[in-house]
Image (cartoon, rainbow, N blue to C red):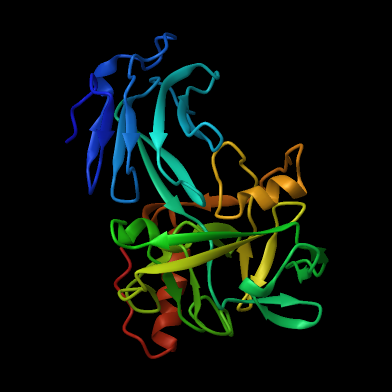
């Protein structure tokens, strides 16, 4: 547990928890008094702040200022934290539990070599560029607005937050995926009408976390004009949804050049399961049955 609220810098430098719940900012309407700059906050770490006491707390990251802001549902600021580091391509998430907001960071993207369906056949995701057409699940040939790239180092990262998930061929259905699909834990695929994060699908047999990954690797994310589903290895997978205050990538400057005035889009109206406990039982049962059909020993479904 890190304790250094009065210090100028807080350096995680490895797994750690920064507990700011004693600040007393939650729901008070007053700006929190935490003034230190936080360094080396990554997938191994957590920042805990007092919640507003009501549902709807959110976290936002301003990629220009590197300021992390936690707000209540009414927009009032609960906490602001100055970060120092490279957070390109990272997603900041907040989970409310027992009066505490816990903040973590992770990456969301496709692994290099993932084949994306286009009107001209399958193309590796890393070869796509702005203007290229890709096929959405409703049969529309939509132009790529931007291809995000993010370089991930595994040296100090938490495997559960960053290391790729492998969805084995046929794990979700007949020929779905058509080949093993490798993507980041927080990248969602559509399963029976639910957007399920890949990490929430892990069962240890047909859907697994990569145990061996390069020291440094690259994720890719496809952005269209709207939040949509494209076919990655014949699997419906979500495209990038624009949250300019929260996300940035290695080539974020390219995106700003393409969209100098920013870009708003609505999220698709699907239910979303971010953790295994949120995955509906009928989906877990179906995936276990698929694993058995593939000749794998499926984990017992609770």
- Between residues 278 and 140, which one lies in front from this camera angle? 140
**Above or below, comparing residue 183 to residue 42 in the picture:** below
On the image, which quarter does residue 232 sit in? bottom right
- Between residues 276 and 131, which one lies in front from this camera angle? 131
**What residue is rendered at 72% in x and 66% in y?**
129
Q: Looking at the image, can residue 100 be seen?
A: no
Residue 275, horizontal then vertical, whole percent:
40, 53
Q: Looking at the image, can residue 273 be seen?
A: yes
**Above or below, comparing residue 23 to residue 167 in the picture:** above
Residue 52, horizontal then vertical, whole percent:
40, 20
**What residue is rendered at 32% in x and 57% in y?**
157
- Between residues 135 and 260, which one lies in front from this camera angle? 260
Quadrant of the rendering where the N terminus is positioned: top left
**Above or below, comparing residue 79 to residue 31 in the picture:** below
Residue 139, horizontal then vertical, whole percent:
80, 70
**What residue is rendered at 41% in x and 81% in y?**
291
**What residue is rendered at 34% in x and 51% in y?**
43
Quadrant of the rendering where the C terminus is positioned: bottom left
- Between residues 137 and 83, which one lies in front from this camera angle? 83
């Amino acid at each position: 547990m890190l304790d250094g609220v009065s210090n100028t810098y807080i350096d995680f430098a490895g797994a750690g928890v920064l507990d700011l719940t004693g600040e007393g900012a939650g729901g008070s309407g007053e700006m929190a008094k935490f003034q230190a700059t936080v360094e080396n906050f990554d997938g191994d770490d957590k920042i805990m702040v007092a919640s507003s006491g009501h549902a709807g707390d959110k976290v936002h990251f301003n990629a220009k200022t590197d300021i992390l802001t936690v707000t209540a549902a009414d927009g009032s600021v609960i906490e602001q934290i100055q970060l120092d580091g490279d957070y390109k391509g990272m997603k900041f998430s907040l989970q409310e539990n027992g009066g505490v907001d816990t903040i973590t960071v992770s990456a969301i993207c496709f692994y290099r070599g993932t084949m994306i369906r286009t009107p001209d056949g399958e193309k590796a995701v890393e070869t796509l560029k702005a203007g290229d057409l890709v096929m959405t699940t409703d049969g529309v040939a939509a132009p790529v607005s931007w291809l995000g790239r993010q370089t991930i180092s595994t040296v100090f990262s938490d495997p559960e937050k960053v290391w790729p998930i492998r969805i084995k061929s046929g794990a979700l259905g007949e020929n779905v995926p058509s080949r093993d699909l490798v993507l980041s834990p927080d990248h969602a695929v559509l399963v029976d009408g639910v957007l399920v994060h890949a990490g929430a699908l892990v069962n240890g047999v047909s859907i697994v976390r990569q145990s061996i990954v390069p020291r440094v690797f690259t994720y890719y994310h496809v952005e269209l004009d709207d939040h949509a589903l494209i076919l990655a290895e014949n699997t419906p997978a979500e495209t990038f949804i624009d949250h300019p205050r929260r996300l940035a990538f290695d080539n974020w400057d390219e995106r700003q050049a393409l969209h100098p005035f920013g870009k708003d889009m609505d999220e698709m109206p699907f239910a979303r399961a971010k953790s295994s406990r949120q995955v509906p039982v009928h989906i877990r049962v179906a995936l276990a049955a698929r694993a058995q059909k593939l000749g794998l020993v499926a984990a017992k479904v609770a």
